[in-house]
Image (cartoon, coloured by chain):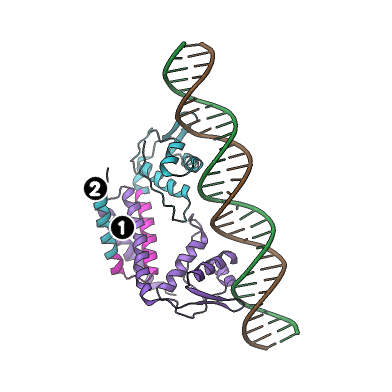
Chain colours: A purple, B cyan, C brown, D green
DNA sequence: TATAGTGTGTATATGGATATACACACATGA
DNA sequence: TCATGTGTGTATATCCATATACACACTATA
C-alpha cells in the first residue's frame, strides 16, 4: 500500500501535521474509500522516512476525528465519511491555502497583475506535471 | 514604531518563523529602508503579544543573514540591501507560496477551473481590503 | 564631568511540544 | 502453539516559547 504523501524536511511545520493534512485530504476527497486498509505504522514510517511514533500520532489524531478506525493487532482502516462534508472540506482547504499565498504576495508588494501571471504560469505547469506523473 | 506583521497562533508553524518571514519581506521589498531604527525587542514583543526572547531570536537570525545590524544599548537597524536581490526575493517568495497552494488544491482533487475561480475571487477581495485598510 | 535613570540587548533556567528508540501486548495464520 | 505482523506504552533527546535576572549605552542634570 502506497500513499501519495510528500513531506518537506525544510519546512518548520511539524512532520505529524504535514502528514495529517495530506492524509485527511485523501480521505475527505474520496481518494481513499471506506474500509480501505491503510499501510501499517512502520510501513508508512519507512516510506516517509520518519519514525513510527510520528505516524502513530497521525493515525491517533485522525481516529479521534472519526476519519479512520484502528484495531490492535490488525491494522488501520478508513471509516465512513459524510458525503456532504466532502465538498465543503475540499473548497474550504483550497480557499485557505490560496488566501495565505495571496496575502503573502501582496505583503511582498507584488501587484495583482504579477500575482495573476504567476498563478497562471504555475497552474499550467502543475496541471501538465499531473497528467504525466501518474506513474 | 509599528510594523505590519501578523502572527497566527492557530498555525503549527513556529512564531519566530512567522515573524522572520514577514520582517525579511518588509526589508527585502524595500518597505523598510536602510538605517531605519526597528522597534525594540520588548516593544515588538508587546505589539505581537509574544515574549521578548522570541523577538530576539528573530533579530539574531536576520542579523546573521546580514539584513539588520544590532548595537547593544542602542537598538536594531536595517542594513543595506543589494538592490538586485530585492526583486528576486519578491518573486521567488510569491512563487513559492502560490505553488504550495496550487499543489494542495490539486491534491484535494480540485479542478483547474475551480482553482482559477477561487483565486480570482480571493484576489479581488484582498485587493479591495488593501485599498481600504491602510489606516 | 560625574552620576543616576531609563532604555537597549544578553544569558540562564523552566515547562511544554515534537521526534525518536526500544520493549510490550494483541491478532492472525501456518 | 508459535511465529510474524499489527498497534501500544515508556523513557530520552531536541526544539519552541517563556520568565527572570543581568550587562551595556545613551542622556538628562546637577
Residue D6 image position (x, y, % from top left): 60, 75
Question: Does A12 sit above or below residue C27?
Answer: above
Q: Mark 2 falls within which chain? A: B
**Which marked residue is nearer to the observer: mark 1 or mark 2?**
2
Q: Which residue occupies the foreground of this view, A45 or D22?
A: D22
Question: 10 Å neighbourhood of mark 2: few (<14), some, or many (≥20)?
Answer: few
Q: Secondary structure at mark 2?
A: helix
Residue A128 seen in the figure: no
Question: 10 Å neighbourhood of mark 1: few (<14), some, or many (≥20)?
Answer: some
Q: Is residue B93 magenta?
A: yes
Q: Residue A13 got which mark? A: none
Q: Which residue occupies the foreground of this view, C22 or A58?
A: A58
Number of numbered discs: 2
Q: Secondary structure at mark 1?
A: helix
Residue C14, image quadrant? top right
Q: Is residue B118 magenta?
A: no
Q: Residue B132 got which mark? A: 2
Q: Residue A118 got which mark? A: 1
Q: Is residue A119 left or right of residue A79?
A: left
Question: Does A127 sit above or below residue B32?
Answer: below
Q: Which residue occupies the foreground of this view, B8 or A42?
A: B8
Amino acid at each position: 500500500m502506497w500513499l501519495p504523501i510528500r513531506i518537506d524536511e525544510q519546512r518548520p511545520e511539524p512532520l505529524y501535521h504535514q502528514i495529517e493534512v495530506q492524509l485527511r485530504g485523501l480521505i475527505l476527497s474520496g481518494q481513499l474509500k471506506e474500509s480501505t486498509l491503510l499501510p501499517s505504522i512502520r510501513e508508512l514510517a519507512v516510506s516517509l522516512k520518519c519514525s513510527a511514533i510520528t505516524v502513530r500520532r497521525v493515525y491517533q489524531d485522525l481516529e479521534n476525528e472519526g476519519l479512520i478506525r484502528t484495531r490492535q493487532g490488525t491494522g488501520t482502516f478508513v471509516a465512513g465519511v459524510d458525503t456532504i462534508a466532502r465538498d465543503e472540506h475540499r473548497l474550504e482547504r483550497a480557499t485557505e491555502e490560496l488566501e495565505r499565498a495571496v496575502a503573502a504576495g501582496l505583503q511582498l508588494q507584488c501587484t495583482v497583475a504579477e500575482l495573476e501571471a504567476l498563478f497562471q504560469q504555475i497552474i499550467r505547469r502543475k496541471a501538465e506535471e499531473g497528467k504525466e506523473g501518474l506513474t
